[in-house]
Image (cartoon, rainbow, N blue to C red):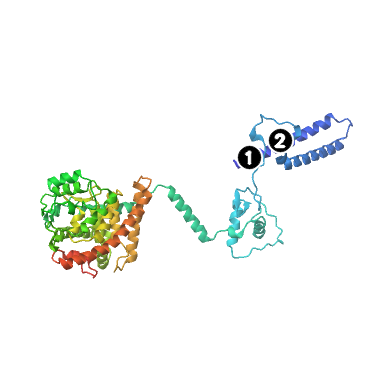
Amino acid sequence: MIKTKKTTNLFCRNWLTLKLDVTLLCVLVFVNTENLTAATFHTKLSNMKLRCCLIVRQVRMSRDAAGVEGVHDVLTGQNEEDEDEEGKVTEDEEPRACGVCGDLAKGYHFNALTCEGCKGFFRRAIKRTTELRCLFLNKCIVTKSNRRACQACRFRKCQAIGMRREMVMSEQEVLERRIRIKKKKMRKIPPQLSSQQEDIIQELLCGHRRTFDSAFSRISGFRPMDRVIFSESECSRSAAEPFNPLTDCPTNSCTTARKSATDPRTWLRACSLSSSSSSSSSSSSSLCGLFEKQETQEGEEVGKSSVFTALPHVMDLTTYMIQDIISFSKGLQDFRSLTIGDQISLLKGATFEIMQIRFNMVFNTKTSIWECGHVAYCIDDAVRAGFQQLLLEPLFKFHHTLRKLGLQEEEYVLIQAMSLFSPDRPGLQQRGVIDELQENLALTLQTWIDCKRTAPDKHLLFPRLIACLTEMRTMTEEYSKQVLQIQDIQPDDISPLIMEVVSKSPCSDL
């Protein structure tokens, strides 16, 4: 395009010059009344041509202010409206020349209008340690054809036209700029899971499905749990009456007669009726009544034995979950590559967190119960196992928050693995390796969300998951503390495996 414009401009100039010569010649021939000789005729023609050139030059210098369109308009006094616009010669169409050598300039480089060759020369000259010297008294003329002859004069001319030394970037700055450009291009490209990330997800999914029984088919072999269930009349009444989270908790609205919950579906129906009308905002406040002292009809305080009625069953369920989590962890290749001491330290710190993440997959936010196959659990079961409000209230809120995010199975297994490979667990030796593993898992989770999620607020999901994992850290400490307190009161109901997990002393093997 630039070569075409240059050729057009040259043609227009030659055509105008030829037209001027012909016009002056005709004037002299037809108006030659003095019968001039050939030599005198040629002299007069040259003088007239020089005058016209001076006039044209003055017009060109002032045509922007005068608003004149072209030289032809000045000479003829006419403005041809129907003339082709591409045939006009304007300043914008003329190519810009390099201020150093006169070559075609493509833009401003280092604060001066230069060509690409002089731009690269100036950058190399700035980074050069040796001093440039001219052998011809620093008076060399730099042109496109001989610009490589004297580097000293070329560099001096670069500085003379305004090229600035401080605008040349260092190697470090160039590298950082390339990285920024690369990141910007990568942001424009739709994210895709790498083959390594897909392998990580598949390994986690296989291990999770192998070790997590969502139907909880082995629950029937656990020690039974005495529960307070609704009578049919009270179920109908609680369904018709409005729900008050501060007073109508399952413990307070139950019948006073206690009997074994032989039919789990009856308990599920009772829990559903008692909490179906509660909203998510009042779910955590519904725990308040569960921690008040329960009294019988005669006003006598219930003894210690009734507080731990659910403890044997809950401990069996916990032991069952811990065994599955250990099996899940040992099935991971990265976990097996760690030392035995680091494996134990990671499991001791992450077992409770992974257990709650797995329980969250069966949590129903509408009824606030955990639907474990044909058996359902509510927060009252944890109260009657001896756990206190300081743990259960944030735990209840955590399950509501995490479940409302609508996680997919892949996202659940990734946050389980992120919780497992936490480099800040006490007693670790290979912290650097574990930190790298967790970083890869976090990047895989972030890429998965970017690829698979389509909601406009998907960019908020990853930080919300990190916040949930952080919140569980404080609950893990409180859980261990309360289990040790329960063990002091009911030592026979807690299995050795649970004690090894919650104890702070190092254990031999899990």
User: Label 2 amino acid?
Assistant: Trp
Disc 1, disc 2: CB below 8 Å?
no
Q: Quadrant of the C terminus?
A: bottom left
Check the image and report above or below for 38 versus 330: above
User: Can residue 426 be seen by looking at this rendering?
Assistant: yes
Q: Which residue reaches farthest front?
A: 298
Q: Earlier in the sequence, mark 1 or mark 2?
A: 1
Q: Which residue is mark 1?
A: 5
User: Label 1 amino acid?
Assistant: Lys
Using the rendered view, name the quadrant where residue 335 is placed: bottom left
Q: For the residue labelled by badge 1, is the local secondary structure a helix, a strand or a loop?
A: helix
Task: Give me the disc on residue 337.
Answer: none
Few, some or many residues within 10 Å of mark 1 (<14, 14–19, 20+):
some
Using the rendered view, name the quadrant where residue 84 is placed: top right
User: Can residue 510 be seen by looking at this rendering?
Assistant: no
Q: Nearer the viewer, residue 131 or 285?
A: 285
Q: Is residue 29 left or right of residue 109?
A: right
Q: For the residue labelled by badge 2, is the local secondary structure a helix, a strand or a loop?
A: helix
Q: Position of residue 77 (x, y in %)?
A: 75, 32
Q: Position of residue 74 (x, y in %)?
A: 75, 35
Q: Nearer the viewer, residue 231 or 394?
A: 231
Q: CA distance from mark 1 to mark 2?
A: 15 Å
Q: Nearer the viewer, residue 23 or 108?
A: 108
Few, some or many residues within 10 Å of mark 2 (<14, 14–19, 20+):
few
Residue drawn at (83%, 39%), measured in percent from left and top? 47
Q: Is residue 486 left or right of residue 446?
A: left
Q: Nearer the viewer, residue 431 or 95?
A: 431
Q: Position of residue 478 (x, y in %)?
A: 26, 63
Q: Which residue is mark 2?
A: 15
